[in-house]
């Protein structure tokens, strides 16, 4: 099989909301912002990285959040992250049915994009 990894996940955001993206992805989820290549930087948006995981937020003119489609990130301490997200006023959704071997929740970024956070049991 030729496919062996994911390079990045792209989500979209409205123009001009990069500071909101940084506040959520860096301050709450713990990603680090990485520089976009110069040829893409003028388009707006922001790129983030945590370990081998990259999230690219691209500006979309007719922005609509991804409320169903979503990335799922494995985390080490879901309960601590939930407390941090709640303190930051994030929308946390615990209504999903259990998944064998995982504790999981969904959270919505400042733009309404759905993100699944999972911790192996």
Image (cartoon, grey):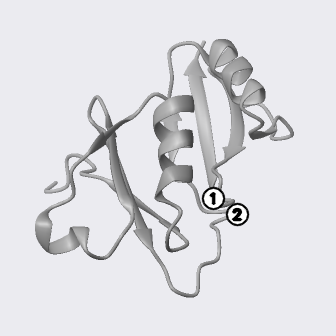
Q: Quadrant of residue 84?
A: top right
Q: Label 1 near label 2: C-beta < 8 Å?
A: yes
The residue positioned 55% from the left and 72% from the top of the image is 14
Q: Earlier in the sequence, mark 2 or mark 1?
A: 2
The residue positioned 69% from the left and 14% from the top of the image is 79
Percent from the top left, x then y, of residue 105? 72, 34
Percent from the top left, x then y, of residue 66? 63, 66
Q: Which residue is mark 1?
A: 113
Distance (Cα) linking label 2 and label 1: 6 Å
Q: Quadrant of residue 112?
A: bottom right
The residue positioned 39% from the left and 64% from the top of the image is 45
Q: Nearer the viewer, residue 66 or 103?
A: 66
The answer to whether residue 76 is above or below residue 9 is above
Q: Quadrant of residue 57?
A: bottom left
Split into 4 quadrants, where in the image is the C terminus? top right
Q: Secondary structure at mark 1?
A: loop
């Amino acid at each position: 099989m030729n496919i062996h990894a994911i390079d990045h996940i792209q989500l979209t955001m409205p123009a001009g909301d990069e500071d909101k993206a940084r506040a959520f992805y860096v301050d709450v989820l713990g990603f680090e912002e990485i520089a976009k290549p110069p040829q893409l930087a003028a388009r707006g948006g922001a790129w983030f990285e945590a370990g081998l995981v990259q999230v690219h937020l691209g500006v979309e003119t007719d922005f609509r959040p991804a409320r169903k489609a979503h990335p799922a990130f494995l985390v080490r301490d879901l309960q601590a992250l939930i407390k941090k997200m709640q303190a930051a006023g994030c929308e946390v959704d615990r209504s999903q049915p259990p998944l064998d071997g995982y504790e999981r929740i969904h959270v919505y970024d400042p733009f309404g994009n759905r993100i699944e956070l999972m911790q192996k049991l």
